[in-house]
Every structure is written in structure tokens, then in C-alpha cells.
Image (cartoon, helix red, strand yellow):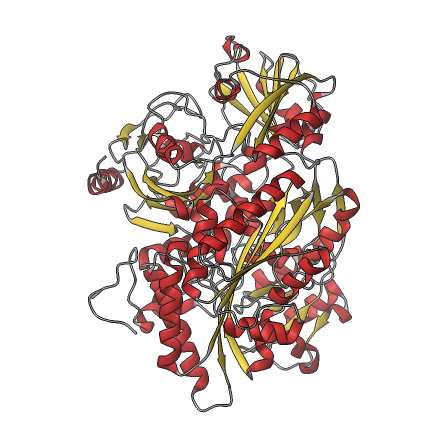
Amino acid sequence: MQFGGSGRESLILALRAMLGEESVLTEKEELAPFECDGLSVYRKLPMAVLLPSTVEEVQGILRLCSDHGVPVVARGAGTGLSGGALPLNDGVLLSLSRFDRIIDIDPEQRTATVQPGVRNLAISEAAAPHGLYYAPDPSSQIACTIGGNVAENSGGVHCLKYGLTVHNLLALKVVTMEGELVEIGSGAPDSQGYDLLALMTGSEGLLGVIVEVTVKLLARPERAQVLLAAFDDVRHAAEAVGAVISAGIIPAGLEMMDNLAIRAAEDFAHAGYPVEAEAILLCELDGTNAEVSEHVMKVREVMQHAGATEVRTARDEEERRMFWKGRKSAFPAVGRISPDYYCMDGTIPRRNLPEVLERIASLSKKYGLRVANVFHAGDGNLHPLILFDANGEGELDRTEAFGQEILSLCIEMGGTITGEHGVGVEKLDSMCLQFNPAELAQFHAIKSAFDQEGLLNPGKAVPTLHRCAEFGALHVHEGNLPHAHLERF
Amino acid sequence: MADIERQLQERAKSAIDAGTPVAIIAGGTKSFLGNRVAAEPLHVAGHSGIVDYDPRELVITARCGTKLQEIEQVLSASSQMLPFEPPHFGGSATLGGAVACGLSGPRRPYAGSVRDHVLGCRIINGRGEVLNFGGKVMKNVAGFDVSRLMTGAFGTLGVLLEISLRVLPRPAASLTLVRECRDPVAYLCGLASKPIPVDAAAQVEGLCHIRLSGSVRAVSEARNQLGGDALDGHEAFWEDLREQRLPFFGSDAPLWRIASGPSVPMPNLQGTWLIDWGGSQRWLKSVAGEVEVRQAAEAIGGHATLFRGEGNAFHPLKGSLGALHQRLKAAFDPKGIFNPGRLYPEF
């Protein structure tokens, strides 16, 4: 065992007695695979990794840890991008990987009840024979688990029309830090009392451990069609986004990529993208056959009017798949053209897209770091990828400072520091910019209502007031920066 | 249109200092719903006006006292709408009341509920602080989702000052088909599994009413596919259903709302029924006892609200949920100042 202390030893002994030897990992080489999540710049080894298989075992673990005052970090597939599942050296890591059973698919009620370790895509696969699917589709959907999706309120490329995880949930079973099993929601469209389902969703493992999830399933649309519009000016592409929405159309997805991202994705996926374009928009329309036909014509017109140099409609399902493959592989594609990249996740009101993209371009010059923009344009959710080399002198520091400026810019525009990746450990300082001390104190009060001792994923998602004071952040209130007349590059 | 935030904050602070509970009231159209609050009124209707609306953003921000009518007119002028079709229950109905009561109309199962469309809010909590949560963008996962927690909390967690909502374009075409249906639950629920642009489905007095909305061609094709007679003045029908003005709602018997999964069997209760939300919201006019109705609702995996009538309004909280609710209430309103007892007698 790496860590000493008699309290810890007695806890490990008790955990072994409850879960069995093979479900309590304590050797360094066993712990190593759990040292980070998708944000691998932060790494820590936990005191132990626990692999329970039943709800009773999860309850037992939380009771024991409560008694010992030991923090608990829950983990699904570890694909999160903000360090939410980063272990704590003095805590245990609770892996839900053995909770991988689909409990029920109910085609009449159009629901799926699953254990939290079930992969996002596996739900749609299980529902497919009934003509149904689960709508939220984060790009990691092959690997990420539904429990993690709930904890992060994950989005995806289709959330413009179909919403985030919170819009597609019906019920949860949650174990509190005291080991109590709480049932939230039901098959009904709402529940009595407070909307705890919404509160749990996106709570980043601070309020309870999710042990069962019931989601809504939707009927597969009759037809989906995707248009690719190319632009020789990023500003025109950004303006076209607002124009599509103004035309009264809600696309299933509306994604944008800039030239650097287009080239990287094309080299990687051979999607047939126009590599000379300064920006492309991918616009997916779905619904009934008749509706899609009508909307394709309309969107084509809107794009051309907005200055598109070319508008293509996918000829068949194969080409549609290729268009999306390019987009969905944009991150790994960018990973090939740079030793490292840092993915940002701010959201801004759509109308500010042109301005924000220009400001990011000038920040890129200021920091001497390239940026590839790949993002959910329809809902204003930006993913600037800052390219850097972690081995380069001071490059990581410059990258983080650059990222911080982008997030400040998002707040200044009336947006948010995270659209879908969560705060985790990564954006704690930025939280000090978005929320004032009273708001942060309100978050802490909510946390205490669920977890009085502060043992569930402590130190994540909500910064302490002390940390914000040290960070010395200026809280940006409703987009009004203090000293707004000063130029900020 | 006026900004009286300062006054409201002062009023809240003095109530908190004195330890005197207040009953938050805006338009007063939904005061029949929920348990009675014996407290000094805190009038918020004067805090009104649309603060921000840009149709391209699909977002509207307005103060709590803004009338729903005004919001709907402004949206309509840009061919947009509140997707959840909130019930008004009177001309003075406000945005704050609609959000605090968490009520949605016929489109709810197909376009989402009021809480699904709430993006952000500004509140006064039980410490007298003015706080902002969420924002004006669709995707936002910074901090706990307080905005949605406030929705349907009946003012027990604080005073809603300002709310940002997602809005949607109005459908280009819309019509309602009426037809006989022997097994309404199976029929209405089954519609949602088909590629048909349904956005409301109810059974009223033995007849199924199905509203189709979308592009002109989509609606016309679906009409041919489904069959049935088109209802004249169909907008008035759905409005009367939403506002509970149909004859069904007229009798003196208590009105129950039973929410459940859409395809579960009808509970075994005496009375008359109206089925809405494609099967998942069922209205019951019945003199059956409270315990009987609630047990029947639970038996089908749902819950029952005594919408109009004398008794406990809301379905009891099970197990540790009651204690959790009380701790959450205390986290926002430690002195129990706002709307005590409106949801449950304990808080």
C-alpha cells in the first residue's frame, strides 16, 4: 500500500471484507490507469480504486467512507475533459465500470432504464430494433457512459434541436454520501417537489453517486439530410448561422469549422471537405421526408444569400456519414498536426460569433499560438483548440493564459465559461469570474444540503471563496467589465 | 415597465430581519394552486418589462412581473413562441408566476416543459442577496442548475426577479384532426413513435384530438396519413383546454392532475377523465378521497396533484426526499421567509 496511516488501513481492510480482494485496487501499477480522465495534464493517484458491482456495495462504500471522513470521487469511463474524475491522493476512486447492464428498454413508454456504466451509444444500439434512439450524442459517445453524461449534463452535435442530457432524462437512482438510496423522478413527465433531476444533472459528482438512469427515447426521424456550405470569410459563415435560425428553421445540428480545422480533418478523415475554404458550416436537417425537402431548399437559399461560395447536399447516406466523420474526428485530426492541443468550451450568444472569432484570432497572434476552431455554431458553443507543445519553454503557461482570456471574453459577451465540458478542476479560477462570492456561497450551501461533510468529489466544480480571493479575479457582472473603456487584447 | 428590484430587495431584507414570512404574489392568477400561505403579501407584479429579446438568439429575458400576454405578443410579431404554451388562468398572468408554478400546456410532451426552456434567472434568496444563475445561452454547465431548480418551486426558494427563456419559431402550418378512438391511451401514446409532426394529443369527451404542426407539406401529408376531420377554430380548442375552460372542467367536483408514463393503464378511480399530453397528463374530476387517488396514481408509477379542491395539494414526498427538500429549502431560505407551506406544510 502506498499510503500509511491506521485509519486508512482499517478502511481498506473493511472495504476488502465487503467487496472482496479483487475489487479493491491499491498497488501503484493498478492505480495508474485511473490517475487522470480526458484532461490528462492533471494526474493523481488515489488511495484505492474500488470496483463495486451492486447498489448495496456502493451504499456500503459511501457509509464506510463517511464514517472514516474519506473523500470519494466517482468515475465512469474517464472521458471527461475538465478533470472532474481526477482522483484525490487522500481519497478513494469509485469506478462504476461494472454497472454496465441495460435493465429495460420499454418501446411503448419510449424509455430505457440502464446502469450508469452503460455507454451512451449502447443505449441507441439497444433501442434501434424498436426504431428508437437516445438523442444526446457527445463526440465521445462510443466510450463515455450515461452516468458521466448525467454528471456533466453532456451535449453533442444534435442538442440544438434535441437538448442536453437534462432534457432527455426521466429518473435517477442516486446514493448520497451517507449511503442512502434516493429515487428522483419516475416515468411521469415531472415529479412532486423540487426539480432534483435538473439539480443532479451537471452536478459533477458533488451531490450523489448515480446508480441507475432512466432516459427518454425518441423515434428515429424519417429522414436526415446534411448540407455543407463553404465560405471564403469566417465572418460570413458566422452570420449565416443566425440567418438560418432567423428563417424559422431549427437544424438538428449546425456546426462550424475554420480553415485549420478543415485541413486537419480532411487529411485525417478524407471527408471531401473543400480545403481552400476559410470556414465551412455543416447543417443537418431531420424530420419527415416532406419537411426535410422543404427545409433543404430554404437553407440552401439562406446560405447562398449569406455569401456561401459553395453549397453541397450529401448525395446519399454514405456521403452524409463522411461529412460527419470529418467533424467528429476533428479533435484527433488536430492532435496530429500539433504535439499538444488545449480544448476550450465557452458559449456565447450567437450574435457575437463574428466578433468573438475575430478577437480569438488576434489573441492567437498575441500569444504566438495557433488556434483551430471547431464548434457547435448553432448554440454558440465554441471549441477553440489552442495548438502548443508542452515541451516548449513556457508554452503550457502561455496556452493556459490564452485560454483564460478566451473564457473571460465569453463572459464579457454574456456567455459562459463552459457549455458542455464542465468545470472540474480545470475552470475553477474562471468560475470566480462568472460568479460573485454570494453566488458561489449559494452553490456551497446546496452542496452541504446533500453532503454536509463535503466528502463527495470535494474541490471540484465550485471554487472556494478563498481560492477566488487568491486568484484575485475580477468578477464580470452581466458582461460589464470593470474599466470597460480600457482596451483588452 | 419598471425596475423595482431595489424596493423588492429592501422589502425582502426587512422581512428576513424581522423573521416575518411573506407570500410572493404577481398576477395572482394561480393562487388557487398549492397550499394556502398565511403571510404578508410581497407584490412583485410591478417589476416588469422585457429586458432583452433578439429573435436570432431564440432567447427572451424579462422581469418576473411581465405579463405572459405581452411576451406572447412580442414573440408572435417575430413569428416565435413560448414552446411550452404556459396556462395563464387569467389576463394578469405573469412570466414569474408561470415559471414559479412550473406549468406547461398541450405542446409539453413534444417540445419540452417550462423548465426545459428556462436558461437563467436572477433571484433574491433568503439572505436578501440578489444572485444570477444560468445565463442567456442554450448550453451552460457552469455551477449547479439553480434556474431549473427554481422552476416549479412555487417561490419557496426565493423571489424570481428576471428569467431568460429559450423560444422557438412558430410552425409554418398547424391543424387539428378529430377522430373516434376506442383505446385512447394506446392511440395517443403510439403517435409519438411514428414520424408524424404531432405537437399536441388529447382525448376529450370520447374524441381524440391530434394537432399537427410543421412545414406546410409535412402537415398536409400527415393529415392524409392519419385521417379524421379537421377541427374548425382549432386554436381556440387548445387554448380552452390549456386554460381549463372546456365543459369538462366546469363541474364543482375536485380536479386532480395525475402525471404518469404515457402508456400506463388508466387508474381504477371513479369520476370523469380528460387525457392530455399524449397520455402522460390525465385530469380527473372526482369526489374520491385523497388517499385513494394518490394510491391509484402511485400504482401506475405516477403522482397526483389536487389542482382545484380542498386538501393537501401535492403528492407526499417519499423516504428521505422530505428531509432533503427541507435541507435544500434551508440552503436558500434559512429563516423560512418565502411562501412557507405553499408546497408542503413542513417548509
Q: Quadrant of the C terminus of chain A?
A: bottom left
Task: Please determine whether, in this image, residue B335 is positioned above or below residue A324.
Answer: above
Q: Which residue appears at 67% of the width and 18% of the height?
A: B228
**Residue B206 figure quarter:** top right
Residue A270 image offset from top left, x and y in percent? 66, 71
Residue A310 visible in the snapshot? yes
Left or right side of B290 for B328: left
> Furthest residue to the top?
B251
Vertical relation: B222 (above or below) A252: above
Residue at 59 percent across and 55 percent down: it is: A227
Quadrant into which the N terminus of chain A falls: bottom right
Q: Is residue B34 left or right of residue A465?
A: right
A29 or A39, nearer to the observer? A39
From the viewer's perspective, is residue B347 above or below residue A14? above
**Image spot of residue B247 (x, y percent):** 53, 10
**Rendered view: B288 above or below A243:** above
Q: Residue at x 43, y 66 (%)?
A: A233
Residue A361 in the image, given as x and y percentages of width and height: 39, 73
Can you tell which quarter of the image residue B217 is in?
A: top right
Drawn side of residue A228 relative to residue B342, left or right: right
Tell me residue A63's x, y (percent): 61, 58
